Amino acid sequence: MDQHQQIVKRIEEQKQHPNLRYALKQRTEYFTNLLFYTLFDSDTEVDKNLNDLEGIFEELTKLACWEQDQPCHTVWESYLASLPDILKKLNKDAQAFMKSDPAANSIEEIYMAYPGFYAIAIYRLSHALLKFGIPLVPRLMTEYAHRLTGTDINPAAQIGESFFIDHATGIVIGETVVIKNNVKLYQGVTLGGLYVDRKLRNQKRHPTVEDNVTIYANATILGGKTVIGANTTIGGNAWITASVPANSVVSTVTNTKIKSIN
């Protein structure tokens, strides 16, 4: 056996995960793009694309459902039936962007140019799919959106209607986060856990954000027992690990000194 063959053999011996197929990642990204265009692009033929999506979805289930008892092939019709309601929610999200951002010149700009809207759209589409028990695909969808937008939303998070994300970059929304209706987040916001421990996997580790809350840039809110009460405003750079009552304003006071160089 020559050196090349020895290297090949050693590499193959270390490839220990038979279900680690990167074709699943690539096809999921294609499925995500086609699904987005089907729902929003006015020139896209909905009927034709839905047929194409069904075929791609069948590919995904063959790649993802390596456990024989998972009835992945029965999911498509149920998922398809959920799409009109998802689109209705996303249209409400887009209206929330128009109401919240004075820089928005048209509703079309929201759909085509706002990374925050795209991140929300892929979250909602992946969250619905997660309910059907398809392994890995929903997470690959949101990680694809994460890569494109800088917004990391776990597909298992629970997010209400009329959600607004401004600028998007650096936002993190953890797996057990609960966000109610009419919430606004700005860049750099983290809704995370107090600490990481595998033993906490089946527990609520991330905050709850009630209705009509605004959280400004770079605020960090941590902990599964932390609740941000309704109608509250969280100022930029705040660090919060305990619940905040409704109708509150939370701000971080900094001491900024300006020194003249003259």
Image (cartoon, grey):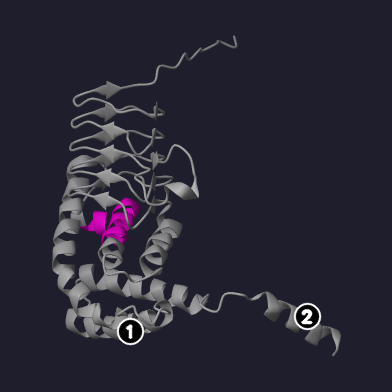
* First to last magenta residue range: 108-124
**Residue 50 located left or right of residue 137:** left
| Mark toward the start of the polypeptide (2 vs 1) | 2
The picture places residue 223, in percent across and down from the top left corner, at 38, 36
- Which amino acid lies under the numbered mark 1 shown in the image of this protein? Glu
Q: Which residue is mark 1?
A: 58
Does 199 appear above or below 58?
Answer: above
* Residue at image location 20% in from the left, 49% down from the top: 160
* Residue at image location 78% in from the left, 80% down from the top: 7
Query: 44 or 173, which lies in front?
Result: 173
Q: Which residue is mark 2?
A: 7
The picture places residue 26, in percent across and down from the top left corner, at 46, 75
Give SS at disc 2. Answer: helix
Residue 101 image label: none
- Which amino acid lies under the numbered mark 2 shown in the image of this protein? Ile
Q: Residues within 10 Å of mark 2 (few under 14, many from 20)?
A: few
**Residue 257 located left or right of residue 225:** right
